[in-house]
Image: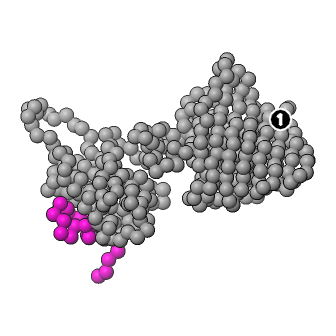
């Protein structure tokens, strides 16, 4: 059987308990979790993952159906580990491009013995592997849940051994760990992102693993393959990565032309006045700033080369005493509308909608609403300000112009 070493990247979250914590005395099954598989940004299939913990160890099981060009249907997969996360068995019953595939592997004393059925032929294979190797079949992404658990127990520079069953053992090297936050259903989900390198023979591949605080797999990403496997609720437009959260940030929905713009409102931290104000004192009205992204905007945070430019600008402006709005442009992120045929004039109407939204807020000084445009956003800002009395000032950043 010709080896074809699997290369994948994952997004993972930290584990809040020790790696080899005492297992419960009763079997405990977590609810099944659904994942969406994306190739080059297009959904091509789904996968379902279940994790059962008991006195004898952990069982990872599931099924999947992934369309072209992969053509994979997994009817059953099951990976068993003992209570110390040492592999015991692996079994899969699947169809790859209409060809039957079955693998049954037993691991004992550092030896993995596999019986393989493929294209109507039976074969066997024996590999010596590390006693604590993670089982990573290239036909089931949910297996990376075990890798997420073990990554949480090592530091950058460390390695985890992985068995690409039934092919060979490789090292998975941890390059960096980053704390992240995901916003989903109005709440923040703390996360940890592990940047890893799969040390495949001759062709190392970079990847990412994200997991929640209980070690649950959230996302697997392999940039070189344009592959993403994302927990279904996080794959929806209702979720977003929050790269820079500020206490008191508001997540708002702004009415536009037949759809809503999803936005974040940042404000200065509350400071108690030196002299108590009378109860009838009016609310403090703040000058406001609207941030407008450029043509390559990936969302309200205006991430450039991994740097969330607008998130940082909003934070600095809020510290300086401004109320700041940054939003997902139409057809981007959580905002409605479509971007395919949108013109500068259309985007300018969206800016005017944001200005109108600010004018109605009791914490905004309606006479001091400014717009900051970056790149093409500068053209949008200029167009929006033309004849719009609500916009009092403009700032253009790296906006193309002719002398």
- Look at 59% across and 38% down and name the residue there: 33
375 sits to left or right of 351: right
Crowd tier of the residue under label 1, counting other residues whose Cα lies within 10 Å: few below 14, some 14–19, many 20 or above: many
100 sits to left or right of 221: right
- Look at 30% across and 60% down and name the residue there: 257
Range of magenta residues = 378-403
- State the image quarter where residue 226 is shown: bottom right
- Look at 76% across and 57% down and name the residue there: 97
Image quadrant occupied by the C terminus: bottom left
Colouring style: one colour
Up the image or down, 288 lies above or below 401; here it is above
The residue to which callout 1 is attached is: 107
321 sits to left or right of 166: left
Up the image or down, 216 lies above or below 165; here it is above
185 sits to left or right of 45: left
List x then y, in percent, for residue 219. 58, 46
Magenta-drawn stretch contains 165: no
List x then y, in percent, for residue 401. 32, 77
Residue farthest along the top direction in this orientation: 25
- State the image quarter where residue 387 is shown: bottom left
Q: Is mark 1 on a helix, strand or loop?
A: strand
Q: How many marks?
A: 1
- State the image quarter where residue 382 is shown: bottom left
Report whether residue 400 is seen. Answer: yes
Residue farthest along the bottom direction in this orientation: 403
List x then y, in percent, for residue 112. 85, 39
List x then y, in percent, for residue 379. 31, 71
Report whether residue 155 is seen. Answer: no
- Look at 40% across and 40% down and name the residue there: 186
Foreground residue, 142 or 300? 142
Foreground residue, 98 or 153? 98
């Amino acid at each position: 059987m010709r080896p074809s070493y699997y290369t994948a990247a994952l997004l993972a979250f930290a584990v809040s308990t020790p790696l080899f914590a005492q297992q419960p005395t009763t079997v405990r099954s977590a609810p099944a979790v659904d994942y969406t598989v994306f190739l080059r940004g297009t959904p091509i299939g789904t996968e379902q993952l279940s994790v059962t913990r008991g006195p004898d160890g952990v069982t990872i099981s599931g099924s999947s159906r992934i369309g072209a060009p992969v053509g994979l249907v997994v009817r059953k997969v099951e990976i068993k580990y003992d209570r110390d996360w040492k592999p015991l068995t692996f079994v899969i019953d699947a169809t790859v491009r209409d060809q039957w595939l079955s693998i049954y592997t037993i691991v004992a004393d550092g030896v993995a013995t596999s019986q393989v059925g493929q294209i109507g032929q039976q074969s066997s294979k024996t590999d010596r592997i590390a006693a604590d190797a993670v089982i990573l079949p290239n036909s089931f992404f949910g297996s990376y849940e075990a890798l997420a658990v073990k990554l949480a127990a090592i530091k950058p520079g460390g390695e985890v051994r992985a068995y690409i069953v039934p092919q060979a053992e490789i090292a998975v090297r941890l390059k960096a760990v980053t704390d992240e936050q995901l916003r989903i259903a109005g709440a923040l989900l703390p996360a940890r992102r592990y940047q890893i390198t799969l040390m495949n023979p001759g062709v190392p591949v970079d990847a990412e693993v994200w997991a929640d605080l209980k070690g649950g797999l959230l996302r697997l990403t392999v940039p070189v393959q344009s592959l993403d496997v994302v927990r279904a609720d996080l794959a929806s437009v209702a979720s977003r990565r929050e790269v820079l959260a500020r206490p008191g940030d508001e997540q708002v929905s702004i009415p536009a032309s037949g759809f809503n713009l999803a936005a974040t409102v940042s404000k200065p931290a509350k400071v108690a006045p030196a002299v108590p104000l009378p109860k009838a004192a009016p609310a403090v009205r703040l000058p406001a700033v609207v941030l407008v992204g450029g043509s390559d905007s990936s969302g309200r945070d205006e991430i450039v080369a991994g740097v969330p430019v607008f998130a940082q600008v909003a934070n600095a402006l809020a510290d300086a005493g401004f109320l700041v709005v940054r939003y997902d442009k139409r057809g981007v992120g959580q905002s409605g509308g479509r971007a395919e045929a949108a013109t500068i004039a259309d985007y300018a109407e969206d800016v005017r909608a944001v200005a109108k939204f600010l004018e109605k807020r009791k914490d905004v000084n309606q006479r001091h609403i400014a717009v900051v445009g970056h790149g093409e956003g500068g053209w949008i800002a200029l167009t929006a300000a033309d004849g719009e009395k609500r916009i009092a000032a403009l700032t253009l950043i790296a906006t193309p112009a002719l002398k």
